[in-house]
Amino acid sequence: MDNRKYDKELVEAIRRKEHVEDVGGMPMNMKPIPDDDRECVLDSRVKATMERKRVLFTERASMRSGYSLLNERWRPDKFTYDLCSGGITETEQLIDVDGTHLIDVFTYREALSAKGNTPAYIFLHGGGFTSGTERIYHNQMRFLAEVSGAIVIFPDYRLAPEAPFPAAVDDCMACIRWVYDNAGSLGIDTSKSCSAVTRLAEALPARASSRILSMLLLVHICFFLHAIAATTILKIFMTGVGSCFQW
């Protein structure tokens, strides 16, 4: 069931008005306010969100005398709606990392999807290596599984400062190896699978063996701002045309 709290027509309006402008010699993608044709004005919805954030951070500062790493890791202001229209099967399990510790790995797939030769999408969340959790991205992972038809995999990797760099890279690399080694039982087609996020994913090729390197497609996290573009990229990759993205 689509539980979004806004008019879906607003999203379509943004797409219709989206365009590219040259700004100082650089092409810039512009997404104007969907229901206001005035220029250089702040969207009232964005303003309301900014005010809620201001209140949230003011309250947190007064309660904990300033910055709190715990608060940064759990951000109710980053809540996302459950936009899935069908059933999603979710699993959670611990996997071994080099025999030294375990990490939680979550998987999401359409409940009625065939369990064989399915593309996988390994989501390596952002957060500056210090924040981020499955609780924040839960609904996004469900939605991505539904619109892409892929098995979405979310490793809850260790965070700094408790686990300094390169702990996050080690954990994510272990997750990718686990996906590759267990592709058969997971029903995954490794020739049509990818991972995504920003700096974290960019560090992985240096650690990957040739057998795993071929299954990595780095997709910038910003695509989540445009779900249709994300779905298009993934579906192209899944059909085999996406082999042009492989290294």
Image: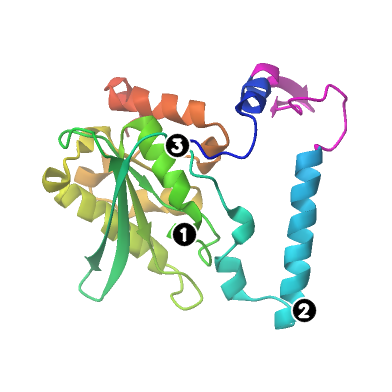
- Mark 1: few, some, or many residues within 10 Å (few <14, many ≥20)? few
Residue 240 seen: yes
Front-most of 1 and 131? Answer: 1
52 magenta-colored: no
In this rendering, the answer to whether 203 lies above or below 216 is below
- Which residue is at a point 57% across and 53% down the rendered structure image? 79
Q: Find residue 233 and report its image quarter.
A: top left
56 displayed left or right of 247: right
Q: Identify the mark nearer the N-term, 1 or 3.
A: 3
Q: Nearer the viewer, mark 1 or mark 3?
A: 3
Residue 150 screen position, x and y as percent: 31, 36
Q: Which residue is mark 1?
A: 135
Badge 3, how many Cα within 10 Å: few under 14, some, many 20+?
few
Cα–Cα gap, marks 1 and 3: 20 Å
Point out the residue furthest to the top here.
16
Q: Which residues are magenta?
A: 16-43
> In the image, 183: left or right of 173?
left
Q: Secondary structure at mark 1?
A: helix
Q: Please tell me which of labels 3 and 2 falls first in the chain.
A: 3
Q: Residue at x 21, y 55 (%)?
A: 178
At a point 29% along the width and 27% down the height, the residue shown is 238
Is residue 17 on the magenta stretch?
yes
Instruction: Using the image, determine if residue 206 lies above or below residue 111.
Output: below
Residue that badge 2 annotates: 62
